[in-house]
Image: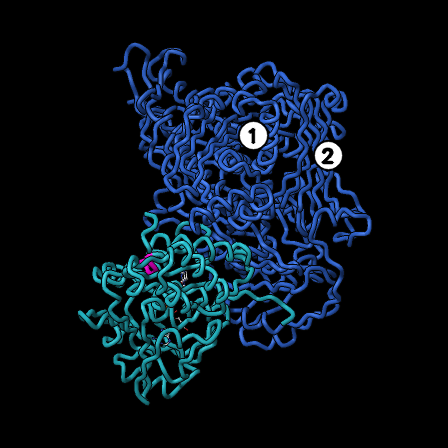
Chain colours: A cyan, B blue
Amino acid sequence: MSVLVFRTTLPRFEYLRPKSLGEALELKAKYGGDAMILAGGTDLLVDIRMRAKKPKYVIDIKGVKELSELKYVEGRGLEIGSAVTLSEIERSKVVKEKFHVLWDAVRQLADFPLRTRATLAGNIANASPASDSAPALLVLGAEVELSSTRGTRKLPIKKFFKWVKQTYMEPDEMITRIFVPEPPRDSKGMYLKFTRISVEDLSVVGIAGLAANPKEPEKRIVRLAYASVAPTPVLVEEVEEIFKHDKPVKELIREAVEAVKKKTSPITDVRGTAEYRRHLIEFGTAYLLNRLLEVIE
Amino acid sequence: MSPYKYVGKPIPRADVDKVFGDAIFSFDVTLPGMLYAKLVGATQAHAKIKHIDYSKALQVPGVVAVFTGAEFPQKIGIYAADRDVLAREKVLYYGHPIAAVVAESLEAAENAAELIEVEYEPLPAVFDVKDALKPDAPILHERLAEYKHASFIYPEPGTNIATRVKLRKGDVEEGFAKADVIVEDTYREPLVSQAYLENWVGVARVKSDGTVEIWSSHQSPFAVRELLAASLGLPIGKVIVYHLYTGGGFGGKAGILLEHIPVLLSMKLGGRPVRLELNREENFHYMAQRAGYIFEMKTAATKDGKLIAHQGRYLLDAGAYADYTVNVARSVTFMAFGPYEIPNIHIDTCAVYTNKVPTTAFRGFGLMELFFASEQQIDQLAEKLGMDPVEFRLKNALIPGKSITPTQRRLREDAGAPADTIRRTAELIGWDKPLEKPKEPWKRRGRGIAAFWKGPVQPSSAAASAVVKLNEDGSVDLLVGTGEMGQGTVSALRQIVAEELGIEPEKVRVSPIRSTNLVPYTWQTVGSRGLYSDGQALMRALEDLKSQIRKVAAQIFKVFEDEIEIKDGKAYVKGKPWDSVTLAEIALGYMFPDGETIHGPLIGRGSHVPVQTTFLDPETGAGEPKPFITFGAGAVEVEVDLLNMQVKVIRAATVYDTPVINPGLAYGQVYGGLVMGMGLALTEQLVFDDHGRLLNPNLTDYKVFRAGDIPKEIKAEFLGVGQRNAPYGAKGIGELTMLAWPAAIINAIYDAIGVRVKETPATPDKLLKEIREQKPELLEEVRKQLLG
Ligand SMILES: Cc1cc2nc3c(=O)[nH]c(=O)nc-3n(C[C@H](O)[C@H](O)[C@H](O)COP(=O)(O)OP(=O)(O)OC[C@H]3O[C@@H](n4cnc5c(N)ncnc54)[C@H](O)[C@@H]3O)c2cc1C
């Protein structure tokens, strides 16, 4: 285009509000990629106004009861319906206690009013490299349940993201639930979010960490995953292996930082320079590991 | 404690209707038969417009018309009429409005807008001020010589210089020759946005008798009226500007905004109402932002700690249109430096056109930006002299009744208390106390201070007036032309009425709708002048009303007028309070028991014009530009986190010399000013790519601090040193509350880690870069702590 037009109005689309999951899946089967799911709408409506997305049909799932449940089963883990809001997750005691890294990420995502609408599934489905919940779900080994009229499948979250704003979901599929397995016993989790202002900002870099049995090398589990350092959220799988070795902690931390540097490719944008992001990757990772491994308070 | 009943007390604001959702903003205005306008921006930073094809746009159902710059030859502006209605012949920046679509609905207008095709012939663009000054630089305004401008603006046709301003005091060469220490440095600040909450909106119509009416989001209804009339060639008497609540302005809504666009469109369309509303992205592109700055400074002192000479070359990056920025250039020149006496000063300032968004006023009118540079000069000089920065400031602070300002005038005796504000600020922040050591070894604390001074930059004729009408129930209607954009001036004015008449503030009403045909004139609501100027007019209006009250009461009680006292909503004979009459009883005059009536309705009127301010000498700047100056200082304690490079303001202290009418409102300004100043110091900037495209025209990436960023500890004091002719001595503070912060914060960062950041904002990535250049060992220490 040879002119700039900043739109205020939304384009026309058909708004559909199914009452059941079956109905929602039928609609998705019928319209495929022409239809987009609206959960909280906090990404979708922004994208539609900016004409980054142009759905013919918008399927609002907030009225679907089957998708509105947040459930915990001892030994199996969490089941989070795709219409569950971030506020509901934030308020859940069991999430805070047992899935602390997820809770920590969710409570830092956007701000209070936004979290009362936004969903976890929407944050994942949107597939932004800056997704704050994705690193937490990656270190927890979450699985995404995808459903269509053809059936249901489960995809490990690390196999879910394809590229910036692209996933391995098929056009007729939608996320119905997110499963988060029981984390290792006595594990600790933390999400470090680096932002430009203290509340309501997208992460310049986000780091999720999970650690169990820090003092016993063979039983030690350490996982790290990142936001805003690569085209997709990334789990640095090498880290877990590194920490199985019986070496002085600081040496392991140095090795882990090196592994992370290799697996990340930060860029310069308005939120920060690549140089600054590399600094955060190094110092942030080191800090997080020191905390999780109880080297420092 | 305040000796008054209402003045000096934190009485709730007059505009609580905002809280209840009753308030009406320009955005709420819709008129029957109204059309919607949509602006279309250019996708080139500098280019000839070869052809605009809008034939497809006209086909869209609901579209009424499309206009381009060719149809509007008018030039718009207050100090330099350099603005086109829509780009004519050339586009001057990426996003420059190039066409306007008018349709029955906004949706139709937007759909049509996208179908417009423009053929450009790209021209070399210039984005950097220094490049724009080079002899072979591309010229933005070839017809600069033809533009109308105020007499005190000096554009240089054939160049990109929108104005050049000079200040000469004493002999700087002589000063530097006597100097023991000299600091020479350059400071930079980027273009930023006023980032007010309410995007601009305007609804206009032309009535059958030719009267133009406009409802719009602005600071100063009378300035809009004057400039609309002047630039469109209309008689003032045919223009009515409605001022409703304005959702923030911060200088960005001073003067005339885009009012001329809906007005002209309505004129073209038989007077049908036309509404132009901007969304956030449009507001960043189509409304003027704040200029960028480069300050080159050379400042000298003698070893006994006295400032002796200052030389400056100040450059303002004015963007594509410099309409208001040309006057900001005067502001930074005539204040020259901080609130200190310097015998020898030499400053050359230029406002320079570049191919970026247009610029205008911003809270502080350039002085926060100036002090960002000068208060770092002060700290650097103090360090070289081995003196404490507070002591150094105190040694040089201006002395009322004695010191000579940069514009060669002696400060009036009751000008204020510069030194006291610095001293008290230092005490409040605990300047001499040891700093707390954070438990994390990568966090460092430091303190910084900055002093400031400011008065309004206005023509020597900037008038104000007020009317007070007494109602039959003893309540009062106050008529003023002051804009209300959240700053609360009308609340303070209301309090003055209450105090003077002894009635409850609730009984004083200021209509939230003020139109230029109904309220008395005031020049503008800018420059922290509202309370001072409109307040003086109000004091006179109240005196007028009171003399009428005394006159009526004197007749009733058969005494001389000077024997009547007005208190608690009553007039009575001194010493005989039982001989009294209520204001309600005499509001429409007084009827004696036999039916005989005297005087008729009571209505007071008052005027104000600044006294003893003058034009300034074009070669030296000598003259008196300011009717008052408020003095103050601000200090912070910051914590620099070397892990994430973030700077946190732990506590802030700030002191102003002036008394205040409403401490609640004043503290509100202090908090707001602090958060805004922090933002400008640490995060806010407009970011452009190599093609001049604005990369962050939204609040997702134009980062404004929020409530959660407000420091936990803020101490503020007002010393109550008033200026005699000001209402209750009160001078302006609205802008003042922001002026210290960028300088104080940067000085505190230096105190904490020994790294000086000479460019705002001190974002984490910039701080990292500076640390790597100036003190890499800091990073090594942290790396050792974390990585062994
Ligand atoms: C002011 C603001 C601040 C923000 N801050 C943050 C932040 O700090 N961190 C962060 O990570 N994000 C942030 N976001 C982005 C956004 O809020 C989150 O990504 C949020 O979790 C999205 O959830 P939603 O329910 O609103 O998604 P929606 O907008 O409803 O959907 C997002 C996308 O996912 C698709 N989708 C939604 N649900 C499903 C489903 N069940 N199956 C298949 N596809 C689906 C939609 O079609 C759409 O493409 C912010 C957004 C705003 C406006």
User: Quarter of the picture for ligand 1?
Assistant: bottom left
The residue lying toward the viewer, choosing from B234 and A205, is A205
Identity of the amino acid at label 2? Asp
Q: Which residue is mark 2?
A: B348
Q: At which x and y percent is residue B76?
A: 66, 49
Neighbor class of circle 2 (other Cα within 10 Å; few <14, some 14-19, many 20+) is some
| B315 on left or right of B545 | right
Question: Which of the 4 image quadrants contains residue A206?
Answer: bottom left
**In this orientation, which residue lies closer to the viewer: B83 or B463?**
B83
Instruction: Reply yes or no: does residue B145 show up in magenta.
Output: no
Task: Tell me: residue B412, above or below residue A40.
Answer: above
Number of numbered discs overlaid on the protein picture: 2
The image shows residue B722 at horizontal and vertical percentages of 47, 20
Which residue corresponds to the image point at 52% horizontal and 66% vertical from the top-left?
Answer: A7
Label 2 beta carbon less than 8 Å to ligand 1 = no
Chain that bears disc 2: B
Residue range in magenta is A103-107
Identify residue for label 1: B454
Q: Amino acid at mark 1?
A: Lys
Residue lying at 59% horizontally and 58% vertically, measured from the top left: B694
Q: Main secondary structure of the magenta part?
A: helix
> Compared with residue B434, is residue A92 higher up or lower down, i.e. above or below?
below
Question: Given the current orientation, which residue lies at the most extreme left position?
Answer: A74
Camera-nearest residue between B318 and A274: A274
